[in-house]
Amino acid sequence: MSETPQPKAPISVFLVDDHALFRAGVRTELDSITDEVRVVGEAGSVAEAVAGIARTKPQVVLLDVHMPDGGGAEVLRRVRTDLPDVVFLALSVSDAAEDVIAVIRAGARGYVTKTISSKELVRAIARVAEGDAVFSPRLAGFVLDAFADRPGSAPISDPELDLLTPRERDVLRLLARGYAYKEIASELFISVKTVETHVSSVLRKTQLSNRYELSRWASDRRLV
Amino acid sequence: MDHVQEKPRTETGMPLPRPPGEGAVVPAAGSTLAEVDERPKMYRRRSSRVVAGVASGLADHLGIKVLWVRATFAILAAFGGAGMVAYGLLWVFVPQRRREETEAPATPREKQQAIGLLILGVGLLVAGGAITGAINGWVAVPLALALVGAAVVWREADESQRRRWRDGARSGVAGMVLGGGGWSAAIRILAGVALVITGIGVVVLRSGSLDQVQFALLAVLATLVGVAVLTVPFWLRMGRDLGEERRARIRTEERAEIAAHLHDSVLQTLALIQKQSESPKEVARLARSQERELRGWLYGPSGYGTPEKKGEDRSVAFSQAIANACGEVEDTFAISVSQVVVGEAQLDDRLTALVLAAREAMVNAAKHAGVDEVSVYAEVEPTAVTVFVRDRGKGFDPETVSEDRHGLADSIRGRMERNGGTVRLRTAPGDGTEVQLEMPVKADSGGTR
């Protein structure tokens, strides 16, 4: 449901990134290419972000993963209990899987890389604003990796949450291969709606799962 | 005692290297300063030393012949060992010349004289002691033994040890004492220690019964413990200072390394980009290759941000090989290749073939699809490794590919099938192309980890 009906109030967006230059760039791009989103504020540090988000109450926060003082995960921890309606989209150059997974586990609805085109960024913002999850191919890869059944990973404690169903795995694989929802749907002979359901359930499992302790998993990954 | 000495660096006859003209011109410009400068700071010599380089250093310092200095020490030794004591004190407190500085070499004759004077000094010491009755004959021999042993140990530990301490202890105690001198140094130290123990042992044993020995040992032990306890703050401070200094040095080195790397990579590339700003394609190519390099440097398997793993397997991993292949294609064809790799495996013949086939598939996509982005997805499973190379470009009809196009047939399909893998192709005109490569993993190599 990425095509939103046009006559609609713009989605309010708050930018959190410790690089002023990057914030300015995103702001200019978002303002220039579309009326769909409106940047209502920005912040360069965890404390500023917490205060700014509480003040402006945006619909979507674009959240940098790597920041001093605890990074995006810290912002999420401090804001989420007070403002459960604000959704977060992680935006990062980071290649370190544990950073990204940490933000997702802390409650972000998706993750995109900073090389994303502005049009796709707007689409992603619209999607998380509607409550859908946004998995970039890279995030899909990270999640597949985290849920992989490999020797040395943490023992399963809750099979309901700690395993991906074959279908979820298929969806995730296709996401990692760069397929759009529509293409995944036709590939697997299911509806787009079902794809969305699978993606949401993968996100929920990633956030709730005991499948791995993060640090443990991260060190597993580095070990290989 | 034999010598393990570096060769003198130059053949200059001057005792000390000094700026030309100094001393000859200076006096008018502040005479006190000139006077201070005229007498160089005293250092023990490094080359041409017989025991510890004290005498020659003193000779350099005073500007007289080393022979006279040595003779003086020898004669002074007769007076209750004053010469020996003076020599020992100077040894302890005068620093050794740095390695880089040049020194005048000693002639063999000088050395002979020095050894002669050394023996003479020891003889005078013993004789003087015997005449004045300060030391009995039976004490003199073990005492001399102990002194010689101590001198050997000191000489060996001397420079290397203390220089190391100053530079921030980097190695263990053994390393400090041995000072990298190897086996000969170790043997000399052991011999020295044996001499000291023998000397002390003889003195102690001769002095009376076993009870007294025990008492003496106890007293010595108590004294040592007392001294150690009293100096605890000093040791603590020294340890802290050394640790702090070491940390500071590591930080500085690290900063320098990061700065150097950023200069060599990022700044150079930015400069290039400024020059190439007319050509967006070239700018994108430069930026992409720089991003990839920096990313690898920061987050890669052997990257800067990755904690070091002991006993890490240095052989190339599959994910690294795929990343390299993607990077090469990006650079050669100025397109962007986004890659996602799940799982990891060590590279073997089959996986190498798989990577090469995947690379060829990327090249095909870059050449024929007419797009500027190609997706690569690789997954390592326990039984097989799969790679998908996908573009959203023109696509083609596999039936119409002419016979002379060898890329797909040989480089991809042939290579995969020779190694037991399979290729699946999905394409249609206008629909993009996806090449799916699957290579079974040998049972013993285990695939994932």
Image (tube, coloured by chain):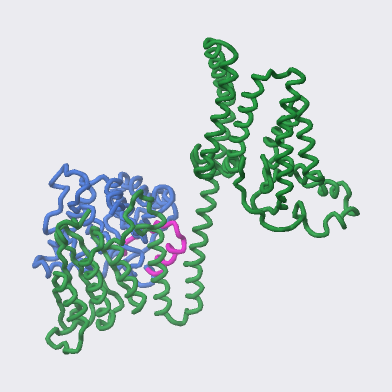
Chain colours: A blue, B green
Residue most toward the left?
A189
Instruction: Report if residue A195 lies within the magenta region.
Output: no
Q: Position of residue A114 (x, y in %)?
A: 36, 64
Residue most toward the right?
B28
Residue drawn where x is 76% and y is 45% of the image: B41
Instruction: Report if residue A11 lies within the magenta region.
Output: yes
Q: Position of residue B366 (x, y in %)?
A: 28, 79
- Give whichever of A53, A124 is nearer the camera: A124
Magenta residues?
A10-29
Residue A8 visible, this orientation:
yes
Report the number of numbered marks: 0
Q: Position of residue A25 (x, y in %)?
A: 42, 67
Q: Position of residue B113 (x, y in %)?
A: 74, 43
- Give whichever of B420, B202 is nearer the camera: B202
Residue A197 visible, this orientation:
no
Residue drawn where x is 14% and y is 83% of the image: B398
- Give whichever of B40, B206 is nearer the camera: B206
Q: Is residue B135 above or below residue B324?
A: above
Q: Does residue B325 appear to the left or right of B79 in the view shown?
A: left
Q: Quadrant of residue B70?
A: top right
- Give whichever of A79, B136 is nearer the camera: B136
Q: Does residue B350 appear to the left or right of B99 in the view shown?
A: left
The N terminus of chain B lies in quadrant: top right
Q: Is residue B188 above or below residue A221?
A: above
Q: Does residue B127 appear to the left or right of A214 in the view shown?
A: right
